[in-house]
């Protein structure tokens, strides 16, 4: 019996929420291992729509949810999200939500610094979610972060705030932004601590026990491989490692616990924020994809940039992300398009490249090499078996499998949970 790790194979927003929800119903524990409330997962269950940013999706299915040490947690956002889903009828308590004692906190000063830096970057801005993700990870690596366990030690909190404020107020002042007062931050943290601390523990111990007891663990990734701080389109990336290996380091589990890695990819491609996007369509076709795919960010509401499926990029994501099989989503958005294009590589300075280079100049200059394939006139929407799909749609999926060197193990054909074609059960390994 394998565990399953779900990661995005493009630039995020691939429809992980639905796939994770579907898998969560068959798991015992669902674990978030990186990112923070920059993520946005939309789960449609019956007539309820849940928008989750920090809470592991398994909670919607009544499963144990764990927030691992690799996640940066804004406690105010976490409590607000807990209240919001409780108002929708979900049970969230220390019995079903556990939080790593060594997870770093995001404080209001992180969001302020994130936004002040973006403003200072002007045209060269990264297009962050403005939630303080980058500055919080910086503090973790710089060894000055306030962590969950510190909420239980007022003196530690006080000392750490001194160090943090020395650093952050200097930067904020330099950027012309408002600075922060220690007492207010301390009071706020001490006030929320009693609501958070009952959830806090050494989650790796629980996960180790669960694994030895043969329980099924689902690791729920956020963002995607092309936003990975090492392997993505740096500097237009998020500040965590989004690849499958992080499921282990971000939860305190051994690498062998990662199990089957399901990479989620849309049947076309989207991106929010700035940065290179070789297959981007700025024409009528791109606009149509955005409209039909309802391509607006869950967290920020920003319109997503749309383009053709980039098989070279997903191939790269399969390799560096450690993807075992792909879940292809939103195939129905392509229904009725007379012809489709798939990027098979890039042309740069007269050379053909199989993968996107690392240097920003080369990334911007790389021209996609397209293969044109015939579209289909029938509908794939709501298909629940391979036999329901038009022949050309099957051909499109098969071509993608060949190019990215990974099997499509799951196909999602509408936002509804049951409109899914399963070729191979990831939990069976
Ligand atoms: P940050 O994670 O807020 O620092 O943003 C860095 C980059 O990652 C920006 O381009 C964001 O738009 C992008 N990003 C962060 N989270 C998500 C997500 O959940 N989906 C898609 N893009 C994201």
Image (cartoon, grey):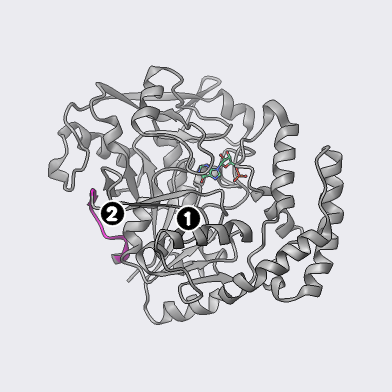
In the structure shown, which secondary structural element does the residue marked by tag 1 occupy?
loop
Residue 176 picture location, percent across and down: 83, 37
Question: Vertically, is 286 above or below 398?
Answer: above
Residue 177: x, y in percent? 80, 40
Whether residue 63 is in magenta: the answer is: no
Q: Quadrant of the N terminus?
A: bottom left
At horizontal 43% and vertical 29% (from top left) the residue drawn is 306
Image quarter of residue 310: top left
Q: Are marks 1 and 2 in contact (CB under 8 Å)?
A: no
Residue denoted by label 1: 221
Q: Residues within 10 Å of mark 2 (few under 14, many from 20)?
A: few
Residue beneath disc 2: 46
Task: Indicate left or right for 216 with 425 as reference.
Answer: right
Residue 79 in percent (x, y) is at 57, 62
Magenta stretch in the rendered image:
419-427
Q: Residue furthest front?
A: 87
What residue appears at the point 52 percent right and 44 percent down from the top-left corner?
A: 299
């Amino acid at each position: 019996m394998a565990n399953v790790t779900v990661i995005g194979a493009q630039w995020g927003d691939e429809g992980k929420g639905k796939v994770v929800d579907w898998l969560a119903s068959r798991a015992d524990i669902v674990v978030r291992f990186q990112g923070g409330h920059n993520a946005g997962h939309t789960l449609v269950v019956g007539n309820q729509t849940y928008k989750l940013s920090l809470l592991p999706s398994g909670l919607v299915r009544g499963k144990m949810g764990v927030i691992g040490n690799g996640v940066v947690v804004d406690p105010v956002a976490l409590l607000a999200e807990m209240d919001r889903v409780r108002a929708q009828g979900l049970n969230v308590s220390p019995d079903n939500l556990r939080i790593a004692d060594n997870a770093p906190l995001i404080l209001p000063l992180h969001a302020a610094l994130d936004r002040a830096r973006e403003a200072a970057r002007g045209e060269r801005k990264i297009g962050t979610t403005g939630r303080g993700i980058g500055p919080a990870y910086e503090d973790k690596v710089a060894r000055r972060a306030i962590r969950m366990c510190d909420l239980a030690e007022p003196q530690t909190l006080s000392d750490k705030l001194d160090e943090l404020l020395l650093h952050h107020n200097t930067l904020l002042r330099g950027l012309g932004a408002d600075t922060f007062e220690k007492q207010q931050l301390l009071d706020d943290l001490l006030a929320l601590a009693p609501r958070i601390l009952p959830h806090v523990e050494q989650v790796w111990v629980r996960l180790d026990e669960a694994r030895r007891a043969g329980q099924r663990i689902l690791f729920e990734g956020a963002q995607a491989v092309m936003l990975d701080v090492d392997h993505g389109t740096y500097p237009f990336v998020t500040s965590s490692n989004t690849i499958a290996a992080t499921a282990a380091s971000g939860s305190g589990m051994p690498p062998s616990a990662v199990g089957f890695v399901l990479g989620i990819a849309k049947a076309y491609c989207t991106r929010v924020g700035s940065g290179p996007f070789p297959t981007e369509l700025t024409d009528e076709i791109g606009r149509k994809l955005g409209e039909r795919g309802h391509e607006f960010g869950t967290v920020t509401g920003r319109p997503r940039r749309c383009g053709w499926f980039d098989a070279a990029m997903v191939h790269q994501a399969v390799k560096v992300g450690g993807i075992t099989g792909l879940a292809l989503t939103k195939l129905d958005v392509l229904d009725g398009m007379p012809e489709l294009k798939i990027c098979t590589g890039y042309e740069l300075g007269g050379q053909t490249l199989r993968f996107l280079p690392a240097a920003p100049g080369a990334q911007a200059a790389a021209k996609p090499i397209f293969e044109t394939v015939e579209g289909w006139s029938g509908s794939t929407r709501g298909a629940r078996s391979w036999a329901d799909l038009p022949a050309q749609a099957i051909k499109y999926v098969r071509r993608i499998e060949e190019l990215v060197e990974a099997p499509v193990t799951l196909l999602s054909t509408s936002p509804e949970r049951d409109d899914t074609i399963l070729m191979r059960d990831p939990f069976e390994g």
